[in-house]
Amino acid sequence: MRRDPLDLRHCFRGLSQASVEEIVEKRLGYRVTQWSDVSMSDWYDKYLSNDQVAYATVDAHCAFLIGRDIGAWEFNR
């Protein structure tokens, strides 16, 4: 299992400058919007807003699906 983050932009041809939204749409066929006001909000606050929780949930789930589909655990070998 990988211990360090894998930059998906370097795993796919033509996506080296892609945003998270573009990678998700190309790899999963989902259109997601990651609002900058949420991504730039205070993630160190004691309590996260509902928007922050939703943002993190979508982000983590999409990362899992892409990682599963490309066999990300194999990149360590």
Image (cartoon, rainbow, N blue to C red):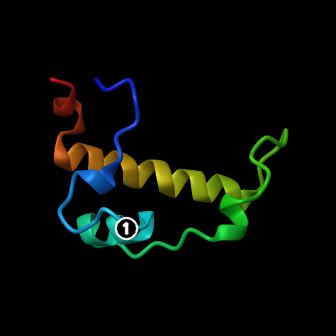
Looking at the rendered structure, the secondary structure element under dot 1 is loop
50 vs 74: above or below? below
Task: Give the image location of residue 56, x and y in percent.
Answer: 58, 51
Task: Give the image location of residue 39, x and y in percent.
Answer: 66, 60
Q: Quadrant of the N terminus?
A: top left
Q: Is residue 52 left or right of residue 7?
A: right
Residue at image position (36%, 66%) is 17
67 vs 49: above or below? above
Task: Give the image location of residue 16, x and y in percent.
Answer: 30, 62
Residue at image position (19%, 49%) is 69
Three-letter code for the amino acid on which mark 1 is drawn: Ala
Identify the residue position indicated by label 1 in the image. 18
Residue at image position (40%, 29%) is 4
* Displayed quadrant of residue 38: bottom right
Front residue of 54/67: it is: 67
* Count of marks overlaid on the render: 1
Front residue of 10/64: it is: 10
Residue found at the far front of this picture? 17
Q: Is residue 32 left or right of residue 2?
A: right
